[in-house]
Amino acid sequence: MVLSKKMLRLGYSSALVAMMASLAACGGGSQTATPDAGTTETAAGSDLSGTVLVDGSSTVFPISEAMAEEFGAAYPNVAVTVGVSGTGGGFKKFCAGETDITGASRPISQEEIDLCAQNGIEYIELPIALDGLTVVVNPENDFAQCLTVEELNTIWEPAAQGTVTNWNQVRSDFPSAPLGLYGPGTDSGTYDFFMDAIGADGESRGDYTASEDDNVIVQGVSSDTNGLGFFGLAYFTENEGSLKAVEIDNGDGCVAPSAETVADGTYQPLSRPEFIYVKQSVADDPAIAAFVDFYIDSANANLVDEVGYVSLPEEINEKVVARFENKTTGTVFEGGSPIGVKLDEAL
Amino acid sequence: MTPLSSQATPLDTGWDIEQKEVLNALGRRQGIDRWFSWLALLAVVFSLFVLVVLLVDVLIDGVPVLNWNFFTSFPSRRPAEAGIISALVGTIWVMVLVALFTFPIGVGAGIFLEEFVPDSWLARAIEINISNLAGVPSIIYGLLGLQVFVRILFPITQGRSVLSGALTLALLVLPIVIIATRESLRSIPSSLRQAGFALGATRWQVVRSHVFPLALPGILTGVILALSRAIGETAPLITIGALTYIPFLPDLSLRGLQSPFTVLPIQIYNWVSRPQADFHALAAGAIIVLMVILLLMNATAIYLRNRFQK
C-alpha cells in the first residue's frame, strides 16, 4: 500500500514535470510570436482578424509559406496556416469544403471539377507563378546538349520499357552507354505534367528510379555519368555545380531553361503555371480577401522569385488580379492540360 | 589417457581411437563456437558502424544550426531565420496527450484481459486481434483518424487539431501498450496471486497491491517505447491533415486542444525535400532535437524501471 502510494505520487510528479516542460516551451514561443509585428503596415493591418486555411501542392508550398510569413508580419491577427497534402489530396479537402485555398501544380482535373460541383463548391482559379521543368544530365555527359521533345518521348514513353536502354537508341550519333533514368513518382503533379508535355499521354515506362523527393533525383543523376532526370527549375539552380541542364528543342531550335526563357514563354513545352484555387463562398471574407490580394499583388512578386520560382509577367498578373476582383469562377483549362495554352490569352 | 588405457586392456586400441574422435569433435565444435562469436561480433560492428556513420553525418550537418534562434523561431522562407518552435511545441503537446490517453486505456485494457477475463475463445480472439492491430501500417490509422476524429467528431475536435492528432496516434500505439502490459503482468509468478486469494483478498485487491506494483516497471517501459514510436510518425498525421506552416502556438487552455498543429517529423520532411542546401542543414538540426527527445524518453524508461525494481 505504502509502496503504491509512493509510486502514484511519482507518477503524478513526472507527469507534472512533462506538463511544465511544455508550458515553458509554449511560453517561450508566444513571446517570440510578435517581434516582427511592428514593422510595416501595422496600423492598417492590425484591426483585421480571422483565419485562412491553405493546403495543397508541395510544389506551391514554398510560395504560400513565404506569402503567409510576410502577410503575418503585416496582419498579425490573421492566422494563416499552410498544409501539404499534395495537389490531388489538396483538391479532395478543398472540394469537401475543408480548406479556403488550395495550391496546385496543375489545373483542376475533370474528376475534381465534378467532385467540387457535387458538393456545391465554387472556386476562383488564379495562376500565381511559373516553373520550368528541367531535364538534367550528369556534367560529364558531353553529347546530350539538346534533346527534342520526340527524343524525350522516345526515352520515357511506356513502350520504351525494357527496350530503350542505351543512349545510342535515343539518337544514333550518341555513344553507346547505358541510360540511367530518374524521375518523380507517379503521384506527383510534376510527373503528370511532364508526361503530358512530351506526348506520352500522362503515362511513362515503369523501369526508372522514382522518388517523391527531388533531392534524391539530384543525387542519382549527379552520381551516374549516364543518368538523366527531371524536376522543377529551382532544384537545378541550387545544384548547378553537379548537374547539367539539357536544352529543349520544341521545333524552333534549342532553348535552355532559365527564369527568362520560362517567363517569356520561349521555353516550351516544359514551362508550367502554378495555381491557387480560392473558395468562392469565402472570397469576400475580409481576412481571406486580404491574403489573396497580398498573394497576387505584383509588389510581392519578388517573394516568388526568392523561393526559386518565376513570377508571372506583369501583363498576365494584371489579368489574374482582375480575375480575383471580378470573382470569376471556374477553370480556363476545362479539365485539360495547360500545355501550349497561352495563359495570357486564356485569361 | 593412461588411467583409462591401463584399465581396459582388450579395448586398448579402441579407446584410443574413440578418444581421438572425441577430441577431434570437440575441437571442431569449439571452432564453430569461435566462428559464431566472430560472426555475431561482425553483425554488431556492422550495425554500429551504420549507426555511427548516420549520427556523425547528421551531427556534422546539424550542429552548426543549433542556436537559440533555431528553438524560438517559426518556420521561414529564409533558412537563417527559420526555427522549429511550432513543430517542437506541437510534438510536446501531442506526446503529452498521447501519454494521457494511452496509459489509462492501454494499461486498463491489459489488466482486464490478463487478470479478470476467464480464458475463453472470445478472450483468445481479442488477443489475436490486438496482436494484428499492432502490425497494421500506420497510414491506415491515419485514414481512420481522418474519418472518425476529424470528420465525425468535428464538434469536439474542431477538425485537424492537436486533439485529433493525439487520438489518432493513441490508437496507433494502444495495441503496443496493451501487449506490453500483458507481457509484464504475465511475468509475475502466479503463486503471488494465489497467496493473496488464500488470505481472502479479492481480485481487485490482489491486482492493486501486489501484481500491478510489481509489473509497473515493465509496463512503464512498454508505454515509453510505444511513445517513442509515436513521436516519429509522420504518415498518419499528414493523412489527418496536420499542417506544415503555422505562425502561432496552441493556447495553453482547453481551446488549445482544438488548435491546428505540426510536429517535428513533418517539419523535417518538408525541409529535407526543399531544393536549398541550407534547409537540409535545418532538417539535420531538427533531427538532432528529435533524437535528443527520443533518448531522453528512453532514459526515463530505464530510470523508472530501475527505480521501481528496488
Image (tube, coloured by chain):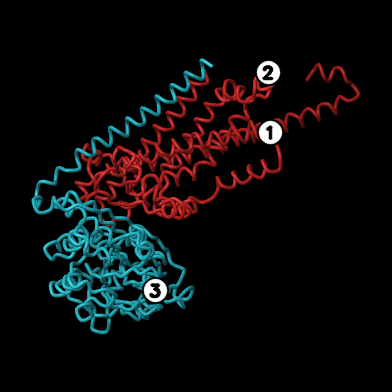
Label 2: state its secondary structure. Answer: loop
Crowding at dot 3, Cα within 10 Å, few <14 / some 14-19 / many 20+, comes out as: some
The CA span between labels 2 and 1 is 55 Å
In the rendered image, residue A11, in percent from the top left (x then y), is placed at 44, 25
Q: Quadrant of residue A170?
A: bottom left
- Number of labels in the image equals 3
- Amino acid, disc 1: Arg
The chain coloured red is B
Residue under circle 2? B200
Q: Are marks 2 and 1 in contact (CB under 8 Å)?
A: no
The chain coloured cyan is A
- Amino acid, disc 3: Asp
Residue A135 visible in image: yes
Q: Dividing the image into 4 quarters, which one contains the C terminus of chain A? A: bottom left
Q: Earlier in the sequence, mark 2 or mark 1?
A: 1
Residue under circle 3? A114
Label 3: state its secondary structure. Answer: helix
Side of A296 where B43 appears, left or right: right
In the rendered image, residue B294, in percent from the top left (x then y), is placed at 40, 36
